[in-house]
Amino acid sequence: MPAPLINCLATTDPLADVFSDGSVVRAMLAFEAALVRAEAKVGVIPQAAADAIETAAKERDFDLAGLAHGGLRAGTIAIPLVKRLTEKVHSKDSHASRFVHWGATSQDVIDTALVLLLKRAHSLISSDLVRLEAALHQLSERHKDTLMLGRTLLQPAPPVTFGLKAAGWLGSIRRSRTRLDRAFQETAVLQFGGASGTLAALGDKGIAVGSALAGELGLAYPDAPWHTHHDRLATYVTTCAVLTGSLGKMARDISLMTQTEVAEIAEPGGEGRGGSSTMPNKQNPIASVMTLAAAHRVPGLIATFLFSMVQEHERAVGGWQAEWPAVAGVVEATGLAAASMAEAAAGFHVSEERMRQNIDATNGVVFAERAAMLLVPTLGRHAAHELVQKASLRSIKEKRRFSEVLAEMTEVARVLDKQTLLAMEDPAEYLGVAEQFRIRLVSGSERRDSGDKKE
Amino acid sequence: MPAPLINCLATTDPLADVFSDGSVVRAMLAFEAALVRAEAKVGVIPQAAADAIETAAKERDFDLAGLAHGGLRAGTIAIPLVKRLTEKVHSKDSHASRFVHWGATSQDVIDTALVLLLKRAHSLISSDLVRLEAALHQLSERHKDTLMLGRTLLQPAPPVTFGLKAAGWLGSIRRSRTRLDRAFQETAVLQFGGASGTLAALGDKGIAVGSALAGELGLAYPDAPWHTHHDRLATYVTTCAVLTGSLGKMARDISLMTQTEVAEIAEPGGEGRGGSSTMPNKQNPIASVMTLAAAHRVPGLIATFLFSMVQEHERAVGGWQAEWPAVAGVVEATGLAAASMAEAAAGFHVSEERMRQNIDATNGVVFAERAAMLLVPTLGRHAAHELVQKASLRSIKEKRRFSEVLAEMTEVARVLDKQTLLAMEDPAEYLGVAEQFRIRLVSGSERRDSGDKKE
Amino acid sequence: MPAPLINCLATTDPLADVFSDGSVVRAMLAFEAALVRAEAKVGVIPQAAADAIETAAKERDFDLAGLAHGGLRAGTIAIPLVKRLTEKVHSKDSHASRFVHWGATSQDVIDTALVLLLKRAHSLISSDLVRLEAALHQLSERHKDTLMLGRTLLQPAPPVTFGLKAAGWLGSIRRSRTRLDRAFQETAVLQFGGASGTLAALGDKGIAVGSALAGELGLAYPDAPWHTHHDRLATYVTTCAVLTGSLGKMARDISLMTQTEVAEIAEPGGEGRGGSSTMPNKQNPIASVMTLAAAHRVPGLIATFLFSMVQEHERAVGGWQAEWPAVAGVVEATGLAAASMAEAAAGFHVSEERMRQNIDATNGVVFAERAAMLLVPTLGRHAAHELVQKASLRSIKEKRRFSEVLAEMTEVARVLDKQTLLAMEDPAEYLGVAEQFRIRLVSGSERRDSGDKKE
Amino acid sequence: MPAPLINCLATTDPLADVFSDGSVVRAMLAFEAALVRAEAKVGVIPQAAADAIETAAKERDFDLAGLAHGGLRAGTIAIPLVKRLTEKVHSKDSHASRFVHWGATSQDVIDTALVLLLKRAHSLISSDLVRLEAALHQLSERHKDTLMLGRTLLQPAPPVTFGLKAAGWLGSIRRSRTRLDRAFQETAVLQFGGASGTLAALGDKGIAVGSALAGELGLAYPDAPWHTHHDRLATYVTTCAVLTGSLGKMARDISLMTQTEVAEIAEPGGEGRGGSSTMPNKQNPIASVMTLAAAHRVPGLIATFLFSMVQEHERAVGGWQAEWPAVAGVVEATGLAAASMAEAAAGFHVSEERMRQNIDATNGVVFAERAAMLLVPTLGRHAAHELVQKASLRSIKEKRRFSEVLAEMTEVARVLDKQTLLAMEDPAEYLGVAEQFRIRLVSGSERRDSGDKKE
């Protein structure tokens, strides 16, 4: 099912499907079916009733009309859905219908259905991340010697390699995937507490039913119901948000590099991508645009989710009711960003030539730090910085090589010979430990060396 | 068209319809049709071409399949839509198809379509606000003498009237409606600038076409295109947000008053409202819950919109692409809050009896301020406060009348006789200028007295 | 008083001073002094007591130690402040001390003090906006014929003038100043309601005292107290946020134009501006950076404020307590953005040469829309777009003039002669109604034409 | 150092001190001192120079005047600070001054100083959390048999124990502490990359210096510099936010239970806590209020931080410049919430009597679910729910025992005898597996059973 048009720049087709009406209802009915199976297994309700309910819950022609409307009036779609399901069962087996939703409350089906949807979504996002990481790894290796400008505050700085830049993207994205997998493990748990979270309606069978139910749904069974303690969900969505921030950083870098004036990279084109309705020349960086749009959306949705954590007693007044669109929005945006960057990273056109030209076009001014480092030991920090600044400005103004301008300054000439000054402007010689950092990043040394090691 | 289930607690049916696929496409096609009408009028394109395009744009069987998907790949649904429209026209009149979208850019149709949707939404919200204000006015008048506890930090404070409380809600909501109408006037303007905002493709006819187009669509014609200057839209949505904040305050008050332990007010019930899937006794305050859910959602969406205002040059990279769901979300939530409170306010069950009992149950301790005011002139602020505090604590602890406890204290007895102390506990005698404030609020004196006066 | 270091990139010196401890305390004491003056005037307390209190409230050596700590424990700094003031008065005139804070509650002094601080802040922001608008007006006039690239999605688009771009900034900023002045008028009102908002402690004198108090403080007297109805404040801060969004858009444009590869504009330098601790060559666009930082901060603070509007009954539990830092943060950021852009706009170095070169460097591809417009009437929309797209790609790939490539295509040559193709690439001839839009923007025609017209 | 007054309800004294000017400058100077020590150790600079710089960096009389102002103009306080430090060293040893800040860039000192501040803050927060958890554990044990109303949507629901409620708070807070410790481990890493993140100025010695520097500062050495990859910091602050959400939930519950009409719990009083400036009777729940205020502030600050992750190339334009106040704000709020709840939890006054009375006051209606469960097997879901609902409404309306009303209904009497109906209203008999859930929560079984187990 495609996304609603109003939302179509905010998700991918597969994620739009996860949060579509059919998918939402199926997840809720999966809960109701698994519940009665578990209850029959534990001996709380008759097996025949469970079978009848499960059969009804699996029907595809489920009459959805009015569910949304009924949900709004009831304050939850669980109520009209349980009502429909009961009617459906009743029409075939009036006795069995008595056991629909037995011992559960609306929140149980609402929260667990959301977890089931997240399970599908997490697997989609994960596989896009794996693709993306592989593409970035390859990109980094291929460009380990490709020189390009460093840029701080969008102004030229000493050179880096494109391999290092790609490795930086990779590092942050891989860290977030590790976090997201861990958060998912924590989040993929059953919610099942009944009216007040004590499973009172099931007498002393609550935990037995709950464990069986979790097993049926392929979810872990938590220490206790979490109806108004949504910290696990919060951890999942905030981890998505951190990932989207990193994807947004990558997209911002790319969108800047695709500027015609910079022209260091181009996104892959392809059918229907990057055009304009009026400018046939356009090759817009759509993957970056979509990723940045996602990075614009997510922070606000996270604020909503976090606000909504302040939930009253055993069922919130407004808090959880605001959650579904927020969670869906975050996950959809994260998935869109991951899929977009994965598609782009697999097909970037990189211009090593323009990268080199952009360094050269600075006339060597980006080596001002290097010049200062050479002069400071003799002249002191203050004098050296002043000299180098003066030379930089002159080089920019007069469009002459920085080394040439420096060579003309007597204070400089006294300390550095022409040879040294010329060598100073070779970018390949001013990369420090860029390659070592790159290797550490792509090899994931972090996981062995740092704080994660003890886990 | 109903809301998607994932979103069904976040909007009303009529607003879900405004932002439904059919409505979005109709608004975009309305722009395309009006554009060619205007261009024919000004003589930029042939009238026959305009007619053919308008006819195609009015077709109901418009093939929508793939629009969402195409929009995602193109970075805007305007591109696939214009393509479809062109094909449609072409199949009937190949010459006319040349003039589809003539001189416009995607952003023109995207932004103007959004304004057209807001026009429908604004009228829906406004009429709910009018209903709500009328109900609150009536409520305030009816309860101008109904005494109830003031409550600060959820602790008892000197009494107010329920009429004053309702008038306070009314005042803030009416101020926001005035602001929202003004913001709407500002926002209901055409966006039409062509590729770079100069209408270059229309030569010197740009303003003539623009004015005619605005007229066709019933929108004002602004000073200039606003493709990357979305301050008017921002004003509209932030004004919605302020209104929703006020509606949320009202809903919070009501949800607190519906607690069984307080029981001063109940929301009207009705078919399908306020039940539970497992607790047949429940009478949940669904209108307040929905309004509070809206108040949880909006602040985060506003953060998204505001951050999206930082748009690059003549077309943003990520900024506007994040706008549609944010604007729709804010407007839907605002409308849901307004409709919910309007429905509730028209049918509140108010228990004057419980309001009075809740005052009485404090044993007079809420008149501590009054006692202090009586004692300070003689005893000084510090001594008076200490005495009154001691008496309050004893009254609470021993569950005795506050006046009685005070009367036993020699320092008090020296200053105040029993008569005065007893009279002190009559809530009707300690209302200050509550009624005057109430009258000022319901009569809207603000609009005459304050900063708004010149309008 | 300077800003705390942790906050020093988030405000200006004058605004840091407005929200400094001394200023906050003075605003609170100004309320207490004006209160007793008003009460003496109305005859509620003795004039001598008012005099004594006012004298104490004006002392500069006010002992502030522990106020912050006491405020945290009490949940409001009004309580420890009133305590100190009372002690101070008491040490000179024990009788007078009884009338300190007479009839008021903490919230009255807290809210009104905030309004008094906003009054100072608003005047600072306004004067920076006036400077900024004047600079932009001048810039727009000076560059009305300066051609530069349009840029959509950071890709080249048909040309605009720098005068139009500056006028676009001006238009949005001026609209927001108008809104901000209006919001300030609404917000500059007294809060005075006593414990529950009825002024019960003042008997029937509440409104007389309130009116006099408002007059003393130079504030308007509203219809009623607004202790838990903060919609006016909300309007002020959201209007600040919309303004900051527009300033952020201007700063983003500038920061992009200052890239070495673009080099169309430079911010003015000056003592201590734009350097680096290690790169002596740097000329960083600090004003834009600070403005963008402000635009990053404000949306989140607005979310906080809006969420805080949901305030319980007559005094909120958490809501207003979160307000002060949020309001101060928004106003400081807005003022920083306004001051930064005002300073920058007054001293921009604009390179008309580079602007022209950047157009030329596209080899005419930005006129693809123009070419399409010329071809569509003969070839149809689809064929024309395909041809032009092919020519664009070839021009980019082969680094040849677009017109030259087009001229070689037989389908094109049939329709357009060389002369037409060459003329097509003159940017000055493809500006549409840019100058008319510019004039409308700088002359503020909007205010006469649109929804604002009645003001 | 106390908090600024404008901010004093937003932090604790110890955390205000962490982010005070003195503390910020000391952290930055600690970096500069450790840097030169590490460089001397590796042989990059003379030991004597390192000694001289370290001596200067330790001076307490560091002249701070103008740092904030200089920071604003430079876009970072690192620049004026390095300048002052250089002057200071120079006045004693002009040769040594050449090696100040050798090879580092502003961002290195800025980011690492922030990490050092977080180290202090984390330890403060952790110890408050440990105190809080201990208090909640004790509270839960003490009240494992204390019956109280469940409440869903603020309406009465089947009973729970106060021990279970406290265990629920404990569970979510302990999960977040585990997450926060893990996030801290990840975040406590050095930032050191030089101008472009390659440490070019240190030649091939970059990693040796970096490792030594990390060791000097007690931080881990990461795979690579993270100047524009702030995902670790983001994980720390979002984890704080999730914790604050859980603390806010606890505070909301408490504030609701302290309502006079509910009166089930009271916060501990104490000098200066909970009073009013005008109402001597007040016992406000200040700890809950402060915690809720924190929960209002944090979500917006998180939105700011997440937005700010989209950082350009090797140094952001606006992104990181917005970070410091956001990080400080989140950490201060989190610490305030943790400290407030720790103080409160250690001294709650719990009224078991009122808890029981509030159950009784519902006249048994909260056992409607139980009644339905008893009737459904015989009567079917629909008929049973209808009957029970009718009985509930009658019980509420006529203020009679629910069981009594039920007993009068013939359809009910046929199925359930009086004995059963009476027993049905014993709350202790309708607790399901509340105690088992409680035990699982307080014993932290989650850590053994669920997704975290492999760690």
Image (spheres, coloured by chain):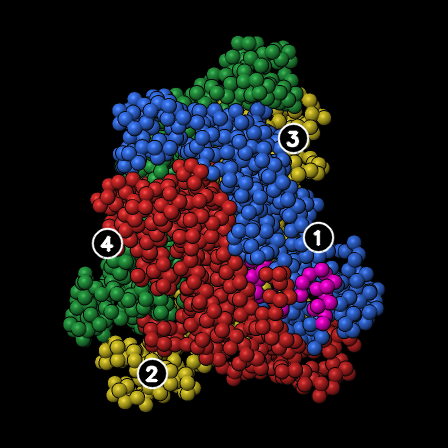
Chain colours: A green, B red, C blue, D yellow
The residue mark sitting in front, 4 or 1, is: 4
> Same chain, marks 3 and 1?
yes
> Same chain, marks 3 and 4?
no
Q: Which residue is mark 4?
A: B61
Above/below status of B434 relative to C26: below
Q: Is residue A95 left or right of residue D321?
A: left
Residue C270 is marked as 3
Q: Secondary structure at mark 4?
A: loop
Q: Is residue A435 left or right of residue A32?
A: right
Q: Secondary structure at mark 1?
A: helix
The residue type indicated by label 3 comes to Gly
Badge 4, how many Cα within 10 Å: few under 14, some, many 20+?
A: few
Above/below status of C354 relative to A170: above
> Same chain, marks 2 and 4?
no
Q: Magenta residues, as a range?
A: C208-234
> Same chain, marks 1 and 2?
no
Q: Secondary structure at mark 2?
A: helix
Label 3, label 1: how far apart the Cα atoms are = 30 Å
Q: Which residue is mark 1?
A: C23
Label 3, label 4: how far apart the Cα atoms are = 64 Å
Q: Is residue D227 magenta?
A: no
Q: Which residue is mark 2?
A: D390
Q: What residue is rendered at 55% in x and 27% in y?
A: C351
Query: Which chain is indicated by disc 1?
Result: C
Badge 2, how many Cα within 10 Å: few under 14, some, many 20+?
A: some
The residue type indicated by label 1 comes to Ser
Above/below status of B412 relative to B219: below
